[in-house]
Amino acid sequence: MSRFFSQKYNKLVPYTPGEQPKDMQYVKLNTNESPFPPLSSVVEALEYEAKKVNLYPDPDCSELVKIIADRYSVDPDMVIVTNGSDEVLNFAFMAYCDKDTAAIFPNITYGFYPVFADINNISYTEVPLKEDFSVDVNDYCNVNKTIFIANPNAPTGIVLSLEQIEKILITNPDNIVVIDEAYVDFGAESCISLVSKYNNLLVTQTFSKSRSMAGGRIGFGIAQKEIINDLNTVRYSTNPYNINRFSMAVAKAIIDNDDYYMNNCKVIIDNREYTQNELIKLGFECTDSKANFIFAKHSDISGKDLYEKLKQNGVLVRHFSKDIISDYNRITVGTKQQMDILIDNIKKILEEIR
Ligand SMILES: *Cc1c(COP(=O)(O)O)cnc(C)c1O
């Protein structure tokens, strides 16, 4: 840290993204990316856009906003598009939390929430999950705080039902409830259908996981228009050109062929069920994940050892050192072929330790 660094950041612990090692080619199952390439229409959109890169992109992002609004059957003034959904989540922390309006979220969830709170000088409460790793909805009733819940949750993959989310919305009428649906396309029910009914609901989604676009940085939020106005005030006050020309063009090309991407999600769901069954046969315990990852532990080997041995064998998964979940690994669901490589390696590792 230099002596010039602002006091207000000197204790900030930044978010740690999943490792992207460059020493060798791994079967990469650690950052929940899609194993499927984008369609050629994405590449064509990029080439076309390249000729116009001397011009600023549309700060209103109006064409893309309209396309996303149509896709989800809401009005365009109920949509904001952001640089990954991380950005809209940060905007929500900026817009709806204060010293007196703290944030609340589970103790085991997306690791960026406490970092967003910290950088914005917001205090927060981390609520323990139940023993089975599910969110206890009662912990979020009448809390008088801004609520952040990932549904499905990360890294457990466990979902809340719409009824459970409605209970949170109804009991916190004076607070914003943010439902982070980064993984919703892999088998959970979206609560976008609740947005017109609840003026305190903000739903966020991303193209990163289900639409092969982690590198394109496209996320969006859906809420009633007053909320979207607030978020746009923050956006225009930080970075009006948050969506660059390329991301905008690519996002449009993706929604035009959304069937392909949604069909890929079905393949991932099948591969998830297949892999989970194989792991259970090998003695693993898995959470009931409705995301594009599996969260699994084995009583014969620690989470860290398994992670390390897999890495030595060229398979990268994600291990979290936090005590409560350190027995587990989060394994991104890839192609059937990648899953078979994973399973073969795990079999080999389990045999070696016997
Ligand atoms: C990946 C992820 C995000 C954000 O991803 P972006 O690439 O910024 O869109 C948000 N929430 C959760 C729970 C995630 O796993």
Image: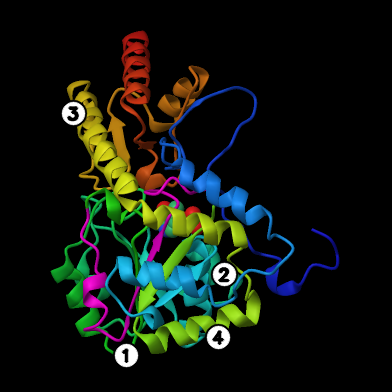
Cα distance between the residues tagged 4 and 3 = 48 Å
- Residue ID for mark 4: 233
Q: Quadrant of residue 79?
A: bottom left
Cα distance between the residues tagged 2 and 4 = 21 Å
Whether residue 251 appears in magenta in the rendering, the answer is: no
Q: Nearer the viewer, mark 2 or mark 1?
A: 1
- Residue ID for mark 2: 118
Residue at point 20%, 34% (across, down) = 273
Vertical relation: 289 (above or below) 317: below
Residue density around tag 1, few if under 14, some if 14–19, many if 20 or more, within 10 Å: some
- Residue ID for mark 1: 174
The residue range painted magenta reads 188-215
Cα distance between the residues tagged 2 and 3 = 40 Å
Mark earlier in primary sequence (2, 3)? 2
- Residue ID for mark 3: 277
Which residue is at the far left?
163
Q: How is the image coloured?
A: rainbow
**Residue 299 in view in this figure:** yes
- The quarter of the rendering in which ligand 1 is drawn is bottom left
Mark earlier in primary sequence (1, 3)? 1
How far from the left and from the top, in percent, is residue 289? 24, 45
Residue at point 38%, 67% (across, down) = 68
Q: Nearer the viewer, mark 2 or mark 3?
A: 3
Mark earlier in primary sequence (4, 3)? 4
Q: Secondary structure at mark 3?
A: helix
